[in-house]
Amino acid sequence: MTAVSDRDLVVDVKGLCKTFHSRSGGSREALRDVSFSVERGSCLAVVGESGSGKTTAARIVAGLETASDGTVEIIAPRTAGTSRRGVQMVFQDPYGSLDPRQTIGAGLHELLKIHGLRRKAERSARATELLESVGLDDRHAAQYPASLSGGQRQRVAIARALALEPALLILDEAVSALDVSVQAQVLNLLADIREQTEISYLFVSHDLGVVRQVSDTCIVLKNGRLVETGRTADLLDSPEEAYTQALIDAVPRPGWRPRRRTA
Amino acid sequence: MAVTLAAVGDVTRRRFAAMGRPALVASAVVAGALAVLAIIGPWIAPYDPDATDVLSSGQGPSARHLLGTDSLGRDILSRALAGARLSFAGPAVIVLISTVLGTALAIFSAWHGGWVDRMANRFLNVMFSVPGILVAVLSSAVFGAGFWAPVLALGVVYTPYMARAVRSVAIRERHQGYVESLQLAGMSSWRIGFRHLAPNVMPIVVAQGTYGFGTALADFAAVSFIGLGVQPPQAEWGVMVSDGRSELLDGALQQSLVAGTLIVVTVIAFNVLGAQLSTRSGGRR
Amino acid sequence: MTPTPLLDIHDLHVRVRHRGEQRTLVRDVSLSLDTAESIGLVGESGSGKSMTIKAAMRLLPPGATAEGQVEFGARDVLKLNRRDLSRYRSREVALIHQDPRAHINPTRTIAQFITEGVVHTGQMTKDEAVERACDLMADVGITDAQRRMRQFPHQLSGGLLQRVMIVAALLPSPRLIFADEPTTALDVTVQSDVMAILGERIRDRQVSMLFVTHDLDLAAAVTDRLAVMYAGTVVESGTSAEIYRRPLHPYTAGLLQSRPSTAEVRRPTAIPGRPVAAYEAGKGCPFAPRCSFTTDRCHTERPDRRTVEGRSVACHRVEEIADLLKEHAP
């Protein structure tokens, strides 16, 4: 383990490369020499368009994909006896993020049992607490995912991730599929959770408006390469790279007109 | 008859699936009634199905023998009712074996993906090319005719059909967020496979199992018909069709006709029900 | 008096059969669209926006029925016979889908896809169609039209494919284009590009557009007028600039405040609850359960559309809360 400087990091990613090989012998470079780190208690946004490699980077940090090259160091106490590494993830699709054949409560109990809560009463209390922390209550515990709305499902997915007390929560386009009015609720919830806990976020998004609200620092990816990195406010107010500027310019806002890229 | 049914399987299945709700209800009622009959059949049979009575042999339908008697004077209705149990037990075991093997194989290969899945897929394709009846006949030839030899053989032969149906659903479920979250939560692959993937592929398992039951019943009866399955004098529908052959020359159709009709009705009911369940299981989200 | 509008939707209701019960998805929607005008139909899930244009093209899914009038050039689309309907769909209007890839046959070339309709209906010969299509492709910024025409859909990116869709939509020279979330599946830079091209083309050819989207910011930027839908009804309609500057309906205001800004950090004011569909709404104002300005009346009596400050708004309390909303506006 390399000595981390005075900064208190949760994740330190260095020189990440990923090449996907297809069966026909072709290959696609999804990431090339990407480095970034997340400070404890902060939120790093990974921004980019489709095919930029942002989701691949997140999945490698989560351990769902292996890197072709580079290192991912997670500075969090490993939970003994499990393969868990202090990282949890919330996915984009609210309809796929929960087991359709398990009630919300049963799912939480199962997770908490893995997490070492042996007594049922203890688990019940914690489950209630978790549901309340995401703006739901015990009534939802008896329900199946099918009877919940998209926003409620993502809340449950967040509660499930929090149940395991991760040092880092990866949010992969976690609010993108939600209706605007509901998206705002979940964004506020994420902000509140961060205020109350020491959790750090790795926030993958294509939506610069959302990124501005939730993140402290930000990296911009394009075709698997790191284009720009910096504090979110600085990066969005005065981007140094033309690509970042183009991304910002393309967001509809008051007085905005769509523009052709190639006139 | 089984060969023909298997050959037209995919086309008829699509036709069955397109028939809509009345077909679902009707096939469920018929299949359910037949299944109940298979359980209580031997108890409600008016005569001992094995009791011969040479004095009243080869009779047509009458008040005493509603469906007449066979050449040994056994009551055909009683044999049909009693025979339902063995006729159903065969395919039931076949479906049980193929479901356990096929589902396990499908979940295993979907879970691992990559080369494991490719190998499994290639293995299934090889198995598809093996004709079921032939394997059942060979099995009986090697291990001796009877109930178990063809049943075990057909159980294995039916496995790739179950595995193929389940695999496509399992692969879809495998990449849902909830499965990956459970992996991140540190849950073992076994637990995810048994507790989460298996319940979520259950609708297609039930549909395919029901469909397979009909076809398996026909195959099993066919093996008995050619004398390598259930042995006379035990009552079983395939055996009855076979027994009835000699009576055809005397103009007595009822034994073959009754058993044959029961087989055809059962096969159609389970096939339609299976196809209906399979279309409906697709839209559970 | 104003000239007759090109498209006049009047008291449109769409109902769908679901497990034996009738569910209302669109309730009492009226909209009119002039020649060369574009209207943004904005709403969240369940608002009935897509069903409205599907009804206007008579492309409703099986089990769904439409009532009311959809008048196009003084004829009621809902009552057209088969031949006239086919003519209406092939020559008068065109539809651009959200996901171009799902609506283009992957086994046919781009040329076959684009020209099939006009050749089949006898509007052009094959050569004419190809020539016109190539011209149009140049107009939408596809540089090597000849080569692209010979390619298959999988060889084109999403943005390029959506431009091909625009070409296919424009080729029969329709008078009205229905665009159903045409850029939702695209990256923002590509969205900007595609919207700019679409805007140019429809202005150039005096085509009207009914633009369906969930993105109020986008709709306000590219359309002349907006109709904001909630729970199957239009809650507010008026010119895009005015609605955007000063929303009168609490839902419109809420939508604007929910949208996070790229320019500043401002905790978005979320609307509590979730969007509902028309059949889920109670007897009062459908937005009442989520609204922070309600009185008893809002929960018991459905508000009618009223004209306030030149806009049509369905809210009992427009006048009283207009200034409060203004303070909240971003």
Image (tube, coloured by chain):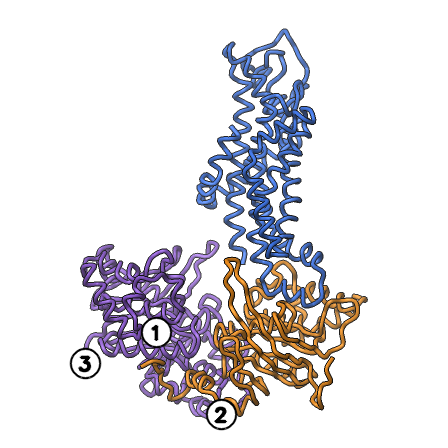
User: Alpha carbon of mark 3 to alpha carbon of mark 2: how far?
Assistant: 49 Å
User: Label 3 crowding class (10 Å Cα cut-off): few <14, some 14-19, many 20+?
Assistant: few
Q: CA distance from mark 3 to mark 1?
A: 26 Å
In-front residue for pair C30/C284: C30
Chain ID for purple = C
Name the tint of chain B in the rendering: blue
Question: Crowdedness of circle 1 by 10 Å Cα count: few (<14), some, many (20+)?
Answer: many
User: Viewed as shown, does residue C65 lie left or right of C264?
Assistant: left
> Which tint is chain A?
orange
SS label for mark 1? strand
Q: Amino acid under label 1?
A: Phe
Instruction: Locate residue A55, reporting x and y percent.
Output: 56, 72
Q: Position of residue A32 (x, y in %)?
A: 55, 75
* Image mark for residue B170: none
Three-letter code for the amino acid on which mark 2 is drawn = Asp
Instruction: Out of B95 and B43, give the one closest to the viewer.
Output: B95
In the rendered image, residues at marks 3 and 1 fall on the same chain: yes
Q: Which mark is residue C1?
A: 3
Q: Which residue is mark 1?
A: C211
Q: Which residue is mark 2?
A: A237
Residue at the image position 57 percent from the left and 39 percent from the top: B212
Q: Residues within 10 Å of mark 2 (few under 14, many from 20)?
A: few
Please provide percent x and percent y for residue B12.
Answer: 46, 38
Could you tell me which secondary element the residue under label 3 belongs to?
A: loop
